Amino acid sequence: MKDLSPDQIARKSWMGLMAKAPKGQVAQLLDAATDRPEFTWLRAPEIGSVMVQGRAGGQGAPFNVGEITITRCALSLPCGTVGHAYIQGRSKPCAEASALVDALMLTEAADSIRDNVLTPLQETQTKARDTRAAKAAATKVDFFTMTRGDD
Amino acid sequence: MYVAVKGGERAIENAHAWLAEERRGDTDVAELSVEQIREQLGLAVNRVMAEGSLYDPDLAALAIKQARGDLIEAIFLIRAYRTTLPRFGDSLPMETANMACDRRISATYKDLPGGQILGPTFDYTHRLLDFKLAADGETPQAPERVATQEPVPHVTSFLNQEGLIEEAPREDTTPPDLTREPLEMPSPRALRLQALSRADEGFTLSMAYSTQRGYARNHAFVGELRIGAVPVEMDIPELGFAIEIGEVTLTECETVNQFKGSKSEPPQFTRGYGLVFGQTERKAISMALVDRALRWEELGEDNVGAPAQDAEFVLYHADNIQATGFLEHIKLPHYVDFQAELELVRKLRADAMAAQMPEAAE
């Protein structure tokens, strides 16, 4: 894997966050944060699939497990900034909102969008993940020795 | 001879209208929503996603509702829908070592890094009907405990450090895809794993069970079973780097199998592997056992003629949509075929009777 620049790492992070967001959440946060800018479609939202690969033995040669549904689109703001979205599931409105956030994160609005859209998204996902991890931890077995038969 | 006939349109329309009414059932009972199916019949949804080979819980729940709970019919609907989607590309291979585990157990090691995590399991329940579920129940609340951030490494990696298990060398080849090219024999392991991951659960279970009962016995231990969420990454050409495009829940089973060794390999453990969409534990364990049985040739084992060693038999009969399509088509009109058979049997009988006539005259 080639090394990414800090800007690419940041973009990879927010695009991944939006790809996994619960349906409707990106649009809701975006609309609460700002009026939507005008834009033109470079690629109107389209629904498709991606073939997901696993590895034999968890680590060996790749094989195809099955597909997931993905919605993607690309748009440009009047200033020429291009936003992309690849999100899980089949929601064109979610893809549109995600591509707008992606584009706005490349403009002067970035700080405001980060605070009002990305940070809450991150908090929701971290909380959901931590809750599941805490429930899993509660089912972790604590073995204790009752008797030992070798003396 | 081919005879085209028309008719039956009204009967078909009315049959479908009745199907819709029967699907709804008693209208005094509240209608089931797709969201209810998705949230409360999660394991049925998981099976439809795994065998439909398309991870989308909303679609799987809709398919179950439309199919009146007939899961093979629901899988059929998902497979049909899947073919309408343009393919955007392939993901990078998922790293199941980074799974956020809901469940992770090992039958081979009691104490292991990451621990034994039972997760939301039916194991250790008494299998007694719970009549509280038939009444209006309270919302259950699962206890929580502070989670340690320790890594949860694959169990086979411990054995690998000692060299006691066969290597599974990391490769970055492009795997064959049976949704693009027909499944042909002999099939490489990557293709077998794809076919098994989407195979019918019942068929895979029975094949796996046959190996346990002695048909190609290979002494499987569940080295590890883990269930949890794994991110899916894909290279995005317009960006020039890979991003996470989603997350899937997977069940992964690694079996550790006895192996006496062969001409080229010392005695060691070998691997069977199962990886299936969703929380689909029975299927993933079955897949690992069948995968191991099918590996006899590459491991230099004897073919003992067991069904589970026969890749052609297993893989050509494991897909429930192919199977049900061919099976169910025989109930559709075969009037002309049958007419021909009828004529043939009448003629053979007449010939046989004529041949017997001289005897009767004597």
Image (cartoon, coloured by chain):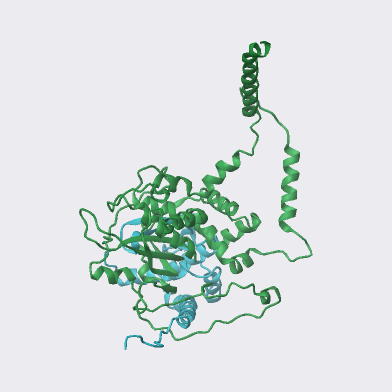
Residue at point 47% right, 60% down?
B283
Q: Tell me where residue B133 appears, x and y as whole percent.
A: 66, 74
Return the residue nearer the eye: A82 or B357. Answer: B357
Residue at point 52% right, 55% down?
B202
Q: Tell me where residue B321 appears, x and y as whole percent.
A: 53, 48
Horizontal relation, residue B35 to residue A66: left or right: right
Residue at point 31% right, 72% down?
A6
Please indicate, yes or no, whether residue B75 appears anywhere in the rendered image. Answer: yes
Chain A drawn in what color?
cyan
Q: Quadrant of the C terminus of chain B?
A: top right
Q: Quadrant of the N terminus of chain B?
A: top right
Residue at point 48% right, 57% down?
B205
In the displayed structure, B314 sits above or below B118; it is above
Q: Tell me where residue B251 appears, x and y as whole percent.
A: 44, 65
In the displayed structure, B141 sits above or below A9; it is below
Chain B drawn in what color?
green
User: Which residue is the extreme one toward the right?
Assistant: B28
Horizontal relation, residue B119 to residue B332: left or right: left
User: Which residue is the extreme one toward the front?
Assistant: B362
